[in-house]
Image (spheres, rainbow, N blue to C red):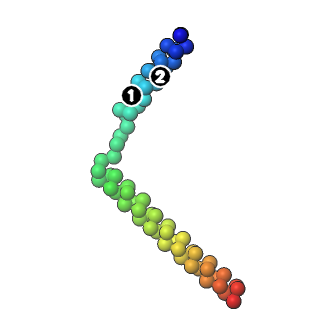
Amino acid sequence: MTNIKSAFQRLGTYLGEVSVEFKKISWPDRQELMDSTLVVITFIVILAVVVFLCDKVIGYVMQLIHA
């Protein structure tokens, strides 16, 4: 019975500490979130174009080799 009580005490302490840490979080405002999202989407588009171009170049080279 002591083990169960101790486990619940540790759980209560843990949840209390989690609550304190959640209060320290600095959430981004709407503009900061939109700016970050735009940066991520731009990077993904650029990366997709680079991968597409690499794929086309490699495909072209492979056709030259097999021809």
Give the farthest residue toward the top.
2
Give the farthest residue toward the right.
66
Q: Earlier in the sequence, mark 2 or mark 1?
A: 2
Give amino acid for label 2.
Answer: Leu
Disc 2 on helix, strand or loop?
Answer: helix
Looking at the image, residue 55 sits to the left or right of residue 15; the answer is right
Quarter of the image for residue 21 reads: top left
Residue drawn at x 39%, y 29% is 19
Residue 40 drawn at (x, y percent) = 42, 59
Looking at the image, residue 56 sits to the left or right of residue 40; the answer is right
Name the mark on residue 20.
1
| Neighbour tally class for label 1: few under 14, some 14-19, many 20 plus, Cα within 10 Å | few
Residue drawn at x 70%, y 85% is 65
- The C terminus, quarter of image: bottom right
State the CA–CA distance, disc 2 to disc 1: 14 Å
Residue 43 drawn at (x, y percent) = 45, 63
Looking at the image, residue 56 sits to the left or right of residue 25; the answer is right
Q: Is residue 28 above or below residue 63?
A: above
What residue is disc 2 on? 11
Q: Is residue 21 above or below residue 11?
A: below
Give the farthest residue toward the front.
1
Residue drawn at x 66%, y 81% is 62
Q: Nearer the viewer, mark 2 or mark 1?
A: 2
Residue 56 drawn at (x, y percent) = 57, 79
Disc 1 on helix, strand or loop?
Answer: helix
Give amino acid for label 1.
Answer: Val
Numbered disc total: 2
Quarter of the image for residue 38 reads: bottom left
Marks 2 and 1: CB-CB under 8 Å?
no
Residue 60 drawn at (x, y percent) = 61, 83
